[in-house]
Amino acid sequence: MAMSEESQVLRQRRQKARELRDAGVQLYPNDFSVQDHLADIREHYGEWSEEDLAQEQKILICAGRIMSMRSFGRASFMHIKDATGKLQVYVQRDVIGQDEYRVFKKMDIGDFVGVTGTVFRTHRGELTLQAQEVRLLSKSLRPLPEKWHGLRDVETRYRQRYVDLVVNDSVREVFIKRAKIIQKIQEFLRGHGFIEVETPMMQPIPGGATARPFKTFHNALGIDLYLRIAPELYLKRLLVGGFERVFEINRSFRNEGISFQHNPEFTMLEFYQAYATYEDLMTFTEEMVCWVAQEVNGSPQLSFQGKEIDLSPPWPRYRLSDALVAIGGLEGSEVEDEEKLRTKAETLGITTAGQESGKVLTKLFDILVEPKLEQPTFITHYPIDVSPLSRRNEEDPSLVDRFELFIGGYEIANGFSELNDPIDQRERFLQQVAAREAGDEEAHLMDDDYIRALEYGMPPAAGEGVGIDRLVMLLTDLPSIREVILFPHLRPERS
RNA sequence: GGGCCGUUAACUCAGUCGGUAGAGUAUCUGCCUUUUAAGCAGAGAGUCGCUGGUUCGAGUCCAGCACGGCCCA
């Protein structure tokens, strides 16, 4: 939508602002000291009788944005809204004064005001502030969206999230809950002896995941740097350094497509625990996710996009190959025989030429099994060629001690016992480098410093990454990642 | 990348067969001192996403493009 500065509504607002300024009213003062918040006022006086309220002499001083206005000749009702809630305000000319009321009449829905007054209850029983003084604190030059349909257009909601937050209370609640989820995860991890750390977001060698990175250039150093695709390799360096339990919750960046499940920058929890195995982490994850749900939603049961999900542990665990048979409907022989597997994959439209067998297996899994995993489910025993940083399985060296967690049909977490054998790790990197030379742009790069760190010795350990955005989607019952990211990436607006 | 859908006033949306662009909210004016989707009376407000094409005439039909959504890869 072209922003026409000439539109009538905008002209009228600017005109009013000029008139106020010409009348000596400061449009953007910053000397109003707020004493009371609206929710506190409602909380405190909510149950008081009309008589008790009439006796109450306390002068309240609050501020907020005007959200609605019902004006009469010499009096007006309005609702104002602050960060805590809403409150009705009654403004009478004979109380605030004739000149003051004239100024007040030039205030608009959307303006920030400071209100001083006492509380009373209206005939209809609504707790209301009787204004003794109304001060303009910030003049709004653009009208807010309509009062009962609100702002619906998703494009405008994302591009102008500030407006979305002003008028759509449910949106605001989502982001409050998001903050609480992250806070509770931190609390849980700290309670288990983990410390929160910050590792580089700009990395000379992007690693820890298979994804394409964003590239940038550091002028002073004269080198290319990459926005991290994962913090993994740095967090494991900290295990080498002697930290035994570390975590990081922050952004990673992947230079890939945008969808309801993907934003180019997204938030991930990664945590690493020395002397733990991937099996320990599965149990730990069950406890953590269930506890967080209990804390933020009050229950481990939830409804996600019409599906009833129960996060109460324990959660079923399937080997990847077993899941393909039991849930994906493949024949046992198809999973065991690579030729049959490839044939099956081709009939499902998967290109298998030049793909390692592990990739074929996981692609089949993505199509046949993942969407069916509504209840929380761990999938274990992944093929080694799709897991270059995971510890090899003791019984079957073609597999690794790794799991992924699925809830609501989406991958939520990925964890494994860490590969801490520097010789094996170097070989795995070399295989990745070969795959990259063969055209796999997402394969890992050699990271010599990481190998060097492992050569000093990393304790046996397990680590895990949890997609925070997807966890928030799950706990808020929202279908799109853009609904849980404040400012999701969109193509630039045309001017 | 492909398919489908959407884009009309500040917001939410109508717009029939191609024939002068509409409603509600918001805004403005008047009346109104307990309203709460306040009420009553009146008024103003549009580059119909953009660029072309067809036509006497295009919001409407056609093509291309842009942005967004959903589905598929």
Image (cartoon, rainbow, N blue to C red):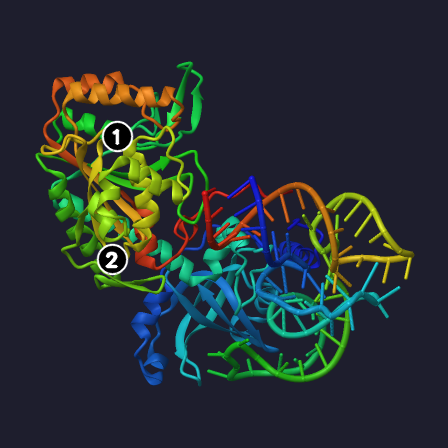
Kindly tell me whether residue A458 is visible in this rendering.
yes
In front here: A236 or A72?
Answer: A236
- At which x and y percent is residue A158? 49, 50
Q: Is A386 positioned to the left or the right of A107 in the image?
A: left
Q: Is residue A187 above or below residue A450?
A: below
In front here: A6 or B7?
Answer: B7
Q: Are marks 2 and 1 on the same chain?
A: yes
Residue drawn at x 38%, y 26% as measured from the top left: A440
Residue flagged by tag 2: what amino acid is it?
A: Gln
Read off the residue under disc 1: A385
Question: Toward which corner of the image does residue B44 lie, by quadrant?
Answer: bottom right
Kindly tell me whether residue A186 is visible in this rendering.
no
Read off the residue under disc 2: A375
Question: Toward which corner of the image does residue A459 lie, by quadrant?
Answer: top left
Q: Please give the label number shown on residue A138.
A: none
- At which x and y percent is residue B69? 50, 53
Question: 10 Å neighbourhood of mark 2: few (<14), some, or many (≥20)?
Answer: some
Residue drawn at x 32%, y 19% as measured from the top left: A434
Chain at numbered mark 2 = A
In front here: A138 or A83?
Answer: A83
- At which x and y percent is residue A342? 33, 37
Question: 10 Å neighbourhood of mark 1: few (<14), some, or many (≥20)?
Answer: some
Q: Is residue A474 above or below residue A115?
A: above
Q: Earlier in the sequence, mark 2 or mark 1?
A: 2
- Looking at the image, the residue that sits furthest to the left is A275
Q: Is A75 positioned to the left or the right of A49 in the image?
A: right
Q: Is A210 positioned to the left or the right of A414 in the image?
A: right
In what element is the residue under mark 2?
Answer: loop
Residue flagged by tag 1: what amino acid is it?
A: Asp
Q: Quadrant of the C terminus of chain A?
A: top right
